[in-house]
Amino acid sequence: QADDFIRANACNKLTVIAEQIRYLQEQARKVLDEANRDADLHHVACNLVKKPGNIYYMYRRESGQRYFSILSPKEWGTSPHEFLGAYKLQHDMSWTPFEDIEKRDAEINILDKLLSRRAALPPCTEPNFQGLTK
């Protein structure tokens, strides 16, 4: 009976590890997808100096060439080209799709608050997420 218990316990722990591996694989996929997207967006034509913190609007000319503009479709009135999407250039030179900007800015604000705290984080032997969401 002890052998059955040990086997079941090991199986449970291995199941947790397998779930963590699947999660990490998915995270790695997301990182690679975002890196590919960012590299692609950095190769889009742009006739101005791109500055982190600004939102850029991507259009496609009839020739198929994509380009960035600082004018939104609303500001164009009637856009001369097909609108493909809007992105914010982050300070780490990554791009955030327009629909994710609010969420990303909130995450960055939380991290900035953590980094700006002068006090060192107290030692902790167990996970403690207290204060991370305020």
Image (cartoon, grey):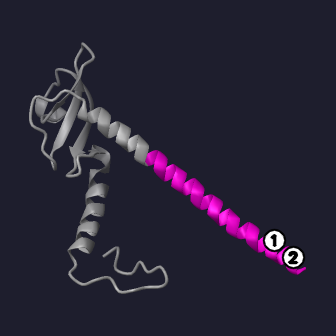
50 displayed left or right of 111? left
Query: Residue lying farthest right?
Result: 1
Query: Residue lying farthest left?
Result: 48
Which corner quadrant of the image does residue 7 belong to?
bottom right
- Whether residue 1 is situated above or below residue 13 in the rendered picture: below
**Helix or strand or loop: what does disc 2 sit on?**
helix
Q: Which mark is residue 40?
A: none
- Whether residue 104 is situated above or below residue 67 in the rendered picture: below
Q: Is residue 11 magenta?
A: yes
Q: Name the residue under label 2.
A: 3
Instruction: Provide residue 127's location: percent of width, then percent of height.
Output: 47, 79
| Three-letter residue code for mark 2 | Asp
* Residue drawn where x is 58% and y is 57% of the image: 21
Q: Are marks 2 and 1 in contact (CB under 8 Å)?
A: yes
**Helix or strand or loop: what does disc 1 sit on?**
helix
What segment is highlighted magenta in the picture? 1-30
